Amino acid sequence: MSKRGRPRDFDYSSIVDVAMKTFWINGYEGCSTQNLCSDTGLGKGSLYNTFGSKHELYKQVLERYHENGIRDQKEILENPISVKERLSNFFAWALEEDFKHTDHKGCLLINAGLERANHDPMVEEIVSKHVELLLQALERVMEEGLRTGEIKKRQSAVDLASLFLSSYYGLRVLITSIQNRTLAEQVINGTMESIFGA
């Protein structure tokens, strides 16, 4: 009886993408080696020979998710349109991501942070890196809004970026808990009003 090994059409990048969905749906603790083998088509030996361990594969998944996510987020925030439109589009992107992936249950990186950041330095490092890069991008947007007069608040760019960031992450955790689009839009409108209102 032949044992399942590495498929002839093995593609490292594709395996990481498949494993991403498996971890996304099950979480790290709820994801067994059998789950990963079944979904990726790899035998247990091939899985460990390629990635070393379940934890190393999880790291590759989170790094991929982080890199893709921060690229998309920065693209929205660096678009040469008004600051208000950029921030509105950013929230719209988050809503689209969370409401179209109902089986994934929210942002993979947020889920990983909530599940493991307190006791897994690797997860904490990747989540912290993502948050810091996003905060820096938001600070640049707020600085532009203050400089051009589009934002009239007497607050620093750092404070405004932190306000937006906390609202954004709170929103995505909320959507993971309850799929209520009306409530999500109310949170967004309140945040935008707090930044651009009189």
Image (spheres, rainbow, N blue to C red):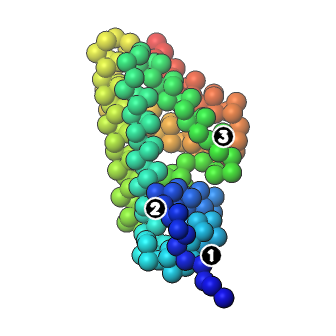
Identify the residue at image location x=37%, y=18%.
80
Q: Is residue 22 above or below residue 1?
A: above
Rendering coords of residue 89 (x, y %): 51, 25
Report, in whole angstroms, how far the alpha carbon at label 1 lies from the one at label 2: 18 Å
Image quadrant containing the N terminus: bottom right
Residue 143's label in the rendered image is: none
Q: Callout 2, which amino acid? A: Tyr
Q: Is residue 121 above or below residue 66?
A: below
Q: Secondary structure at mark 1?
A: helix
Q: Quadrant of residue 49?
A: bottom left
Q: Work out whether residue 61 or residue 4 is closer to the camera in this orientation and state it.
A: 4
Q: Callout 3, which amino acid? A: Lys
Q: Earlier in the sequence, mark 3 or mark 2?
A: 2
Report, in whole angstroms, how far the alpha carbon at label 3 lies from the one at label 2: 26 Å
Q: Quadrant of residue 79?
A: top left
Residue 136 visible in the shown view: yes
Residue 100's label in the rendered image is: 3
Q: Secondary structure at mark 2?
A: helix
Report, in whole angstroms, how far the alpha carbon at label 1 lies from the one at label 3: 27 Å
Residue at the limit of the structure toward the bottom, as seen here: 1
Q: Is residue 87 left or right of residue 7?
A: left
Looking at the rendered image, the disc whose residue lies closer to the viewer, 1 or 3, is 1
Q: Earlier in the sequence, mark 1 or mark 2?
A: 2
Q: Disc 1 designates what residue? A: 34
For mark 1, does the 10 Å Cα neighbourhood hold few (<14), some (14 to 19), or many (20 or more) residues? few
For mark 2, does the 10 Å Cα neighbourhood hold few (<14), some (14 to 19), or many (20 or more) residues? few
Q: Disc 2 designates what residue? A: 12
Identify the residue at image location x=43%, y=71%.
51
Residue at the limit of the structure toward the front, as seen here: 8
Rendering coords of residue 3 (x, y %): 60, 83
